[in-house]
Image (cartoon, rainbow, N blue to C red):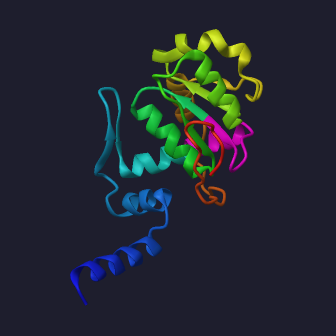
Amino acid sequence: MDMNNSYVEKSRNEKSQLLDVNHRIRFAAQFHSNSPVLADSNQRFTWEELDKTLNQVANALIKSGIQPNQRIAILGRNSVDYALLFLGGLRAGICNVPLSTLASSEALAGMVNDSEAKLLFVSRDYWDLIEPVTDKLRTLIPGGLKVLESEITMICRAFPVLLKVPQVHPLRSLSHSTGALI
């Protein structure tokens, strides 16, 4: 057996044991619980803290009424809060729709509507970009426009750790141009 086939076979075996991001995070939380994994100038998370926080975020999203395979849109800079929301959405079985910070206000409204996002999380840095088109966001549930950083802070304080996360559905991808499921 040559080295390339051996590597492919090993990769297949590893994939069957650690099926998705959630399983990989839980695995790391068990075996590397105190190792740092995610940080910025204000926050630092170990694998164990990340795992627990993602449960809190997933719990909050589920409590808000979002169902598995429904979509949330996220407009924000790369940050710990963005990562927590994105990964927490995956844990809840939600489809994340990352929005381009380079898009125009009108284009962003179109992306949110085309994706049928139920919630839109906007970083404070980009609030001025979305504010002119809030009346055009047709698919959001009532109260569905949220400030990303405030929501993550509130979620981490208010929601208990979810002990049993719902069945995670296969990750489906969205077209970046149309927002359609592929």
x and y percent of residue 163 in the render? Answer: 60, 55
Q: How many marks?
A: 0
x and y percent of residue 143 in the render? Answer: 72, 23
180 within the magenta span: no
Q: Nearest the camera: 159 or 149?
A: 149
Q: Residue at x 40, y 34 (%)?
A: 80
- Residue found at the far bottom of this picture: 1
x and y percent of residue 89 in the render? Answer: 57, 44
x and y percent of residue 56 in the render? Answer: 56, 43
In screen coordinates, is 115 left or right of 31?
A: right
Camera sees residue 158: no
Q: Residue at x 31, y 31 (%)?
A: 40
Q: Residue at x 54, y 14 (%)?
A: 129
Range covered by the magenta-colored residues: 56-72
Quadrant in the rendering for residue 66: top right
60 within the magenta span: yes
The quadrant in which the N terminus is found is: bottom left
Q: Residue at x 69, y 33 (%)?
A: 114
- Residue found at the far front of this picture: 177
Q: Nearest the camera: 166 or 141?
A: 141
Vertical arrangement, residue 1 with respect to residue 54, above or below:
below
Quadrant in the rendering for residue 157: top right
Quadrant in the rendering for residue 29: bottom left
Vertical arrangement, residue 6 with respect to residue 24, above or below:
below
- Residue found at the far left of this picture: 3
Camera sees residue 30: yes
In screen coordinates, is 22 left or right of 112?
A: left
Q: Nearest the camera: 136 or 118?
A: 136
